[in-house]
Amino acid sequence: MVKLTPSQQAQVGLETAALEAAPHPEKFRAYGAVLDISRITELTNSYANAQAQLQTAQAKLEVAKSAYDRIKNLVDSAALPKKEAETAEGTLRIDKAALTAAESQLRTLVATARQEWGPVIGRGIVERSPAVVRLIERDQFLVQVTLPPGVTVDGAPATALAQAPTRNANIDLHYISPATRTDPRIQGLSFFFSVPGDSGLLPGMNTTVYVPSGNTYEGVFIEDTAIVRWQGRSWVYLRVGPDSFRRHPISMDQPVSDDDYVVRDIPSGSEIVMRGAQVLLSEEAKSELRGRDDD
């Protein structure tokens, strides 16, 4: 319990608000891994090269066909010996085979891209879409999000929130498609998401991700300014009297945005300290120190 007189509360700018519980989207705690997309880069470049080879083969075949038709007409009119037509026909057949091989290579790369990365990213590789270019240029990173075993969601989650290891905030993830493989360590449903390249996440990192379940639950919306961290836990202060406040533990497993949360374990209508919670924590620490000195 911490006590501050009304004048002390005004002096430190302490503000409270009575918060009511309301329905909020429920989120599952999932597992995120930032992927190395060197294979996407390789497939994108290979497809571009194969497309260029196909165009070259098409052009060579057109030239060979024109040459063969011209020489055949000359041979038919006895202007050229028959062997000239045979040579031109051989060149034409070689160029037709080269075109067939180039077409086959292109089809193989398309199938490989879709098998490895799914229809959405696979099509982006083939079309060199802006989304794939952003991945290649590291403007965005690719995150594979895997749900715990046995957990399912209704439909595709449009967004999710990830924790960055380098800062105390959450990061918006944007849904791309179902993943083509699961994380072998977890064995749950997996999805591909994108994350901004300046988010603090880097390829090779693992992170906790919160994915909407499609269900709702009753909880109290808490802003980050009301939350204090102490002894490895998160707390808020509840007003229990005109000059009395009590520290109350909360769970932060349901983030709403970068810094805000919905908490289930606070009674609806509780008066919560929205500004000045850190001051109360400092006063509580001072009181403990004074108590020890008295002892």
Image: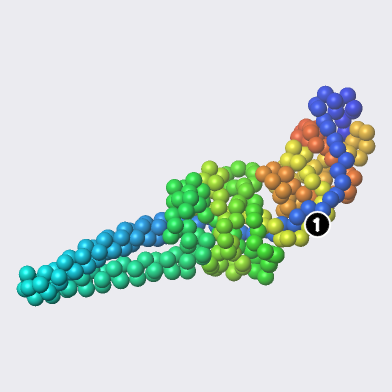
Q: Is residue 87 visible?
A: no
> Which quadrant is home to the C terminus?
top right
Q: Is residue 274 visible?
A: yes
Disc tally is 1
Percent from the top left, x then y, of residue 45? 37, 57
Q: Determine whether, in the image, residue 1 is placed left or right of residue 175.
A: right
Q: Determine whether, in the image, residue 190 is placed left or right of residue 213.
A: left
Front residue (pair 16, 130): 130
> Which quadrant is home to the N terminus?
top right
SS type, badge 1? strand
Structure colour scheme: rainbow
Position of 163 relative to 119 (above/below): above
Q: Quadrant of residue 92?
A: bottom left
Q: Quadrant of residue 210?
A: bottom right
Tell me what residue is drawn at x 43 percent, y 60 percent. 126
Q: Determine whether, in the image, residue 74 is placed left or right of residue 282.
A: left
| Badge 1: residue crowd in 10 Å (few <14, some 14–19, many ≥20) | few
Callout 1, which amino acid?
Tyr
Percent from the top left, x then y, of residue 265? 83, 52
The residue that label 1 is drawn on is 217
Tell me what residue is drawn at x 26 percent, y 61 percent. 59
Position of 14 relative to 221 (above/below): above
Percent from the top left, x then y, of residue 132? 47, 53
Which residue in the rendered view is the most extreme toward the front? Answer: 77
Tell me what residue is drawn at x 22 percent, y 67 percent. 65
Front residue (pair 285, 193): 193
Percent from the top left, x then y, of residue 191? 59, 62
Q: Quadrant of residue 125?
A: bottom left
